[in-house]
Each structure stands twice: as structure tokens, then as C-alpha cells.
């Protein structure tokens, strides 16, 4: 009898790793295949990047608190975020949807309003897609294409010992926003007369419902003449992403708890939920900020940037991956990430 392996035994990354072993590359124009935020194709004068993401109702979004317009915007933003992570500029998207008969034409139009809003915001052309029926709710898949150059493209694999580790914005907000939305949903289900008061959670709920890809940072780095040595976007949580950079680059990392960026609202809500705010920062998903490393020689150019935080440094692989706590103790970094399986 042939062996049956449960997907949960391998997890998402283990499964991709296993599939990857069987993939062959036939064209030397394919510069980068599976294993980064986007694939990279040599187009002569430029490099093109391609990335795709699939969002499934009930797994990635809940329409009881996620308006369709926001969902449309987010579906584009998460792809643009992967283009940004390659230090590339997005140019085109394709949009594919599967719909159950629960959805009306007006509902699909609402979704598309969000998609078009994002297309305008990120200056991308919607050039095609596919539409089909679904037996189980809404599925949306977007592919984004972007442009960069051989000199500017940034992979997960370029981090060097002594490089400085940087993150943009603040982290953990999207996770705490999700916790609040889930809690209010349960309250509403138990008592439909209760109107949730989300005003005091405006920042974190918007982090969850309407993330914005950091294209601003990609343009600013370009203006400052800084090419990061490695980069990726933070979709699964900082710790998990650091593991990817570490593995791809063959390096270790040290980050400092007191340097991790957290918004006050995120912090307060974590406490409200009896959660360690640092856990939210390290393992919260869907912030769509950028994690990158720079050579120390570039530090002076970014030092005063209000939205770039220097959270640690790259070290030799044998030194491992660690978090230095506020009390000065080094503890091994653990990556929980997001498990859909
Ligand atoms: P991200 O979180 O940046 O979107 P993922 O973790 O989804 O990245 O994917 C990591 C890499 O694995 C990417 O290069 C992606 O294209 C590739 N990948 C994911 N799923 C598959 C699949 N089913 N077949 C081939 N490649 C895949
Ligand atoms: Mg990514």
C-alpha cells in the first residue's frame, strides 16, 4: 500500500519545499523560480517579477466583518507587497474569482470597486483574469507583475554578516485587529441587538481590513540610493520571515526586544487579550510591512527615516537566531507563523 502523508505533517512551507524538489527550470531567462516573494524573469533591458496569492473565504477572510470593497483592495495590496519585497515597481495585475450563487452582480461590483481603487493607488493596470463558479463561497486570486533591474532586484538570500536588520512601520496590529473583529463577531452572534463599538480600535482594525503595501519605502530607498542586501514582506509574522531570510542567506540573526516597533493601540489590545505584546509583534501575521537588511555603510542614509526601525543585526550562522530581551538575556527566536493546515 502506498504511504499517505497528512499535509499537516509537512505544513505549508514543508509542502512547498517538497513540491519544489520536483520542479525543473527549462529557460535561462528564469532568474528566480520558487522560493522568494516573487519569481524573477530576465527581459533584456529589465527584470520582471511575478507573484500570485490566493484568498479563500472562511480561511483568509470573513465577509461578516470584512466589507467586499476592502477585500478587493487588500487582495491587490498583498500582491503589490510581494512586488515591493523584490524592490520592484508593480505594473499589471490579473484578477481571478470563483463565486457561489450567494453573490449578486452588485456584490461583485463592490469587490471590483476596491480592486480598482487599489489599481489606481498602486498605479497598476488590470489586464485580465478568469471568472468561474464555486460551491463554497468566494475565492479570489490575484497575480501581480512588476518591473525592476538586475542591479536593483533584492532577494531573501543576500543578507551578510554584520548587516543591519530593518523593519518598516509597526507590527502586530493586523493580528490584534483580527482578534477584536472576531470577538465582536461572537458578541454580535450571541446578541444581534448589540452594536459593536469599534472606534477605539480604528487603527488595528484598519491594519487588518485595509493593509497598504509599502511602495513608498521602495521609492524612498531608490531616491536615497540604497539597495537592501535582502528583503521580504511581513505576511506571516516577523519571526517566521527572519527564519526565511536566515535560511535563504545562510546567516544567523539577532534582534532586540526593545527595538521592535509596536503601536500603542496594538500594545494595549494585546494586554486586554492577556497576550504578550511581543508575541503579537513576532508572530502576528498580515502586517505587510517590509523586513530588509542593509550594509552598515548605508546606515547613515536611513538613520533619520521616521518609519524605518533598526531592530538588530545579521550574524554568523553558528551563532543562531536570537531575541535579546529587555533584561539583556538572549533567547532562541521561535517562529510560529500562520498555519492554515
Ligand atoms: P509569500 O508569503 O511571499 O506570498 P509564499 O510563502 O506564499 O510566499 O510562497 C513561497 C514561495 O513558494 C514562492 O516562490 C511561491 O511562488 C512558491 N509557491 C507557493 N505555492 C506554490 C505551489 N503550489 N507551486 C509552486 N510554487 C509555489
Ligand atoms: Mg511575501
Image: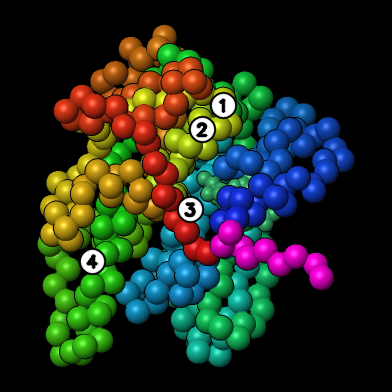
Q: Is residue 7 magenta?
A: yes
Q: Are marks 1 and 2 in contact (CB under 8 Å)?
A: yes
The residue carrying pointer 3 sits among few (fewer than 14), some (14 to 19) or many (20 or more) residues within 10 Å by Cα, namely: many
Q: How far is disc 3 from disc 1 in space, using C-alphas?
A: 24 Å
Query: Nearer the observer, disc 4 or disc 2?
Result: 2
Q: For label 1, count other residues whose C-alpha is less than 10 Å away and answer few (under 14), some (14-19) or many (20+).
A: many
**Residue 245 visible:** yes
Q: Which labelled disc corresponds to residue 245?
A: 2
- Residue labelled 3 has its Cβ within 8 Å of some atom of ligand 1: yes
At mark 2, the secondary structure is helix
Q: Residue at x 39, y 77 (%)?
A: 63
Secondary structure at numbered mark 4: helix
| Mark 2 neighbour class, 10 Å CA radius: few under 14, some 14 to 19, many 20 or more | many
Counting residues from the N terminus, which is met first, the one under dot 2 or under dot 3?
Answer: 3
- How many marks do you count on the picture? 4
**Mark 2 vs 3: CB contact within 8 A:** no
Residue 265 in view: no
Q: Is residue 197 left or right of residue 182?
A: left
Could you give the CA–CA distance between mark 1 and mark 2, rounded to whole angstroms?
6 Å
Amino acid at each position: 500500500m502506498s504511504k499517505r502523508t497528512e499535509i499537516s505533517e509537512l505544513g505549508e512551507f514543508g509542502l512547498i519545499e517538497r513540491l519544489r524538489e520536483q520542479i525543473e527550470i527549462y529557460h535561462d531567462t528564469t532568474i528566480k523560480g520558487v522560493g522568494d516573494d516573487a519569481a524573477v524573469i530576465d527581459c533584456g533591458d529589465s527584470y520582471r517579477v511575478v507573484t500570485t496569492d490566493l484568498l479563500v473565504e472562511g480561511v483568509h477572510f470573513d465577509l461578516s466583518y470584512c466589507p467586499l470593497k476592502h477585500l478587493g483592495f487588500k487582495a491587490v495590496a498583498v500582491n503589490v507587497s510581494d512586488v515591493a519585497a523584490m524592490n520592484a515597481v508593480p505594473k499589471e495585475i490579473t484578477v481571478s474569482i470563483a463565486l457561489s450563487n450567494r453573490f449578486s452582480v452588485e456584490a461583485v461590483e463592490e469587490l471590483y470597486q476596491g480592486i480598482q481603487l487599489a489599481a489606481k493607488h498602486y498605479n497598476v493596470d488590470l489586464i485580465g483574469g478568469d471568472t468561474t463558479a464555486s460551491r463554497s463561497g468566494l475565492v479570489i486570486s490575484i497575480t501581480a507583475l512588476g518591473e525592476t533591474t538586475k542591479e536593483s532586484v533584492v532577494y531573501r538570500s543576500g543578507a551578510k554578516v554584520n548587516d543591519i536588520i530593518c523593519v518598516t512601520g509597526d507590527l502586530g496590529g493586523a493580528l490584534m485587529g483580527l482578534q477584536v473583529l472576531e470577538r465582536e463577531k461572537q458578541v454580535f452572534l450571541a446578541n444581534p441587538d448589540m452594536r459593536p463599538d469599534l472606534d477605539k480600535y480604528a487603527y488595528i482594525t484598519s491594519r487588518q481590513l485595509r493593509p497598504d503595501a509599502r511602495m513608498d519605502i521602495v521609492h524612498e530607498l531608490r531616491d536615497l540610493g540604497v539597495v537592501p542586501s535582502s528583503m521580504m514582506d511581513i505576511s506571516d509574522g516577523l519571526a517566521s520571515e527572519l527564519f526565511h531570510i536566515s535560511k535563504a542567506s545562510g546567516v544567523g540573526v539577532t534582534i532586540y526586544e526593545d527595538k521592535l516597533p509596536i503601536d500603542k493601540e496594538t500594545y494595549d489590545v494585546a494586554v486586554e487579550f492577556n497576550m504578550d505584546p511581543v508575541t503579537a509583534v513576532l508572530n502576528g501575521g498580515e502586517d505587510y510591512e517590509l523586513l530588509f537588511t542593509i550594509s552598515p555603510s548605508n546606515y547613515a542614509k536611513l538613520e533619520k527615516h521616521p518609519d524605518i526601525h533598526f531592530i538588530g543585526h545579521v550574524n554568523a550562522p553558528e551563532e543562531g537566531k536570537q531575541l535579546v530581551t529587555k533584561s539583556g538575556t538572549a533567547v532562541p527566536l521561535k517562529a510560529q507563523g500562520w498555519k492554515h493546515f
